[in-house]
Image: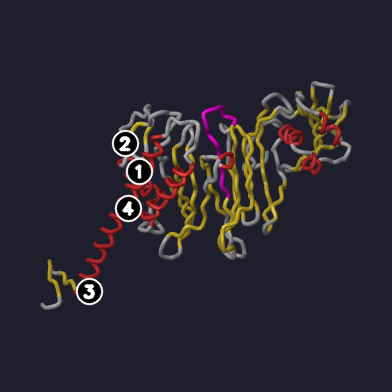
């Protein structure tokens, strides 16, 4: 049969054979390109490894190059990943390839034998990559990559891809860039993506922290981006950093016009090294960012926030301008119990041992707090004890 190829009772047309050959050529070219990308990435990582013990400088250019090369290699593989693909299996395959190329390492205490190098030092993994992680969120993929640094750090980057109907397209990247103090390596904790607004745009909330080698008191980072819809380019709306106990909860949510997150704050305004659930809630109306309630979930937590903030912010949480003088002078108080008032159930009295001193806090459900008064004399009707009033909990849980 001329023009046809007969094999095992299947007829292959000339066009089919041509397409098969072209597909094979394409796959071979892709494999060669990926091999070249890994080769270049390996060269960059080996260069970074050579300066591992030089703590006097940070190889900013090498780190940026490694990030770019790693992303290009992942994207070459992502081109074959379908909409409903198994992202965990995909990430495992990517990490296995990186491990086989000795681009990642494993702790010396790791009892498993997954191959690859052992990490040279638990506190210095410069010259190695972190694992790739991928999370499926509806029609989005959240990719997280990492480059190992000295001082117990890994600099992670987050990339958001959207399915366009036939491929994954990068729509948002969140990377730490710059040099000197402007460069703040981070560990990505979570990326939350909102549902679409009427315009089709969405908000992405990125939560990260700086791990380092020191105590659990470390900086956390949170950023809010608007992207998609009528937004031609991703726009950074919110960027903040605060000190936190990174051993505590750190989570958040994103909506089309606001974001909210919580973390464990530590300060000494009321009680030494007092830990409380700090909440940050921001309205995102266009390009205007405005902080909203809540800021805490308990009266003691709120008082710490009130005392720690600048008066320009605390004034919004105050029922009298006369409280400014108290705000300026108070620090290092030791709270001795929180009691509810009989005559007004919305009022809670916090007694401080120094003074004596009494804070009167108004609490409107679920978490709207204001300072009603501060005095050297307490209200005699504030005697109702509530064993659970000082229990810290998640703002995302149902209020008691």
Q: Is residue 120 above or below residue 132?
A: above
Label 4: few (<14), some (14–19) or many (≥20) C-alpha neighbours in 10 Å: some
Q: CA distance from mark 3 to mark 2?
A: 44 Å
Mark 4, residue position? 34
Q: Earlier in the sequence, mark 2 or mark 4?
A: 4
Frontmost of labels 3 and 2 is 2
- Could you tell me which secondary element the residue under label 3 belongs to? helix
Q: From the image, state whether disc 1 or disc 4 is nearer to you.
A: 1
Whether residue 380 appears in this view of the structure is no
Can you tell which of label 2 and label 4 is closer to the viewer? 4
Q: Earlier in the sequence, mark 4 or mark 3?
A: 3
For this view, does 46 lie left or right of residue 236?
Answer: left
Segment tinted magenta in the rendering:
205-217
**Is 189 included in the stretch rendered in magenta?**
no
State the CA–CA distance, disc 2 to disc 4: 19 Å
Tell me the residue at 43%/50% (across/down): 68
Seen in the picture, residue 97 relative to 255 is either above or below; the reply is above
Q: Element under label 2?
A: loop
Decide: is 104 above or below 194: above
Question: In this figure, which residue is indicated by the disc labeled 3?
Answer: 15
**Which residue position holds label 2?**
116
């Amino acid at each position: 049969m001329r023009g046809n190829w007969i094999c095992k009772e299947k007829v292959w047309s000339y066009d089919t054979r041509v397409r098969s050959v072209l597909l094979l050529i394409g796959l071979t070219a892709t494999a060669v390109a990926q091999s070249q990308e890994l080769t270049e990435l390996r060269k960059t990582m080996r260069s970074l490894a050579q300066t591992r013990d030089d703590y006097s400088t940070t190889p900013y250019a090498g780190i940026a190059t490694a990030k770019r090369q790693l992303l290009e290699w992942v994207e070459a593989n992502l081109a074959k990943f379908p909409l409903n693909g198994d992202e965990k299996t995909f990430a495992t395959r990517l990490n296995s390839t990186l491990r086989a190329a000795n681009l990642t390492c494993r702790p010396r205490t790791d009892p498993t034998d997954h191959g690859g190098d052992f990490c040279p030092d638990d506190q210095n993994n410069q010259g190695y990559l972190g694992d790739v992680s991928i999370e499926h969120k509806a029609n989005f993929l959240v990719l997280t990559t990492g480059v190992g640094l000295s001082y117990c750090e890994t600099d992670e980057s987050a990339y958001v891809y959207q399915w366009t109907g036939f491929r994954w397209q990068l729509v948002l990247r969140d990377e730490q860039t710059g040099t000197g103090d402007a460069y703040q390596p981070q560990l990505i904790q979570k990326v939350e993506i909102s549902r679409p607004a009427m315009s089709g745009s969405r908000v992405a909330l990125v939560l990260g922290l700086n791990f380092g080698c020191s105590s659990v008191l470390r900086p956390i980072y949170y950023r809010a981006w608007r992207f998609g819809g009528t937004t031609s380019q991703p726009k950074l709306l919110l960027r903040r950093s605060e000190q936190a106990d990174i051993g505590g909860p750190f989570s958040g949510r994103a909506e089309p016009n606001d974001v909210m997150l919580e973390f464990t704050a530590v300060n000494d305004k009321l009680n030494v090294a007092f830990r409380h659930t700090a909440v940050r809630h921001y309205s995102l109306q266009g390009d205007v960012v405005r902080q909203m309630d809540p800021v805490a979930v308990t009266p003691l937590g709120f008082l710490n926030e009130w005392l720690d903030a600048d008066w320009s912010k605390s004034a919004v949480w105050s029922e009298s301008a006369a409280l400014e003088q108290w705000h300026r002078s108070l620090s290092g108080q030791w709270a001795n119990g929180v009691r509810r008032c009989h005559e007004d159930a919305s009022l809670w009295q916090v007694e401080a041992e120094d003074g004596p001193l009494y804070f009167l806090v108004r609490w409107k459900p679920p978490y709207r707090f204001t300072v009603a008064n501060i005095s050297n004399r307490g209200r005699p009707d504030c005697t109702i004890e509530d064993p659970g009033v000082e229990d810290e909990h998640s703002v995302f849980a149902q209020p008691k």
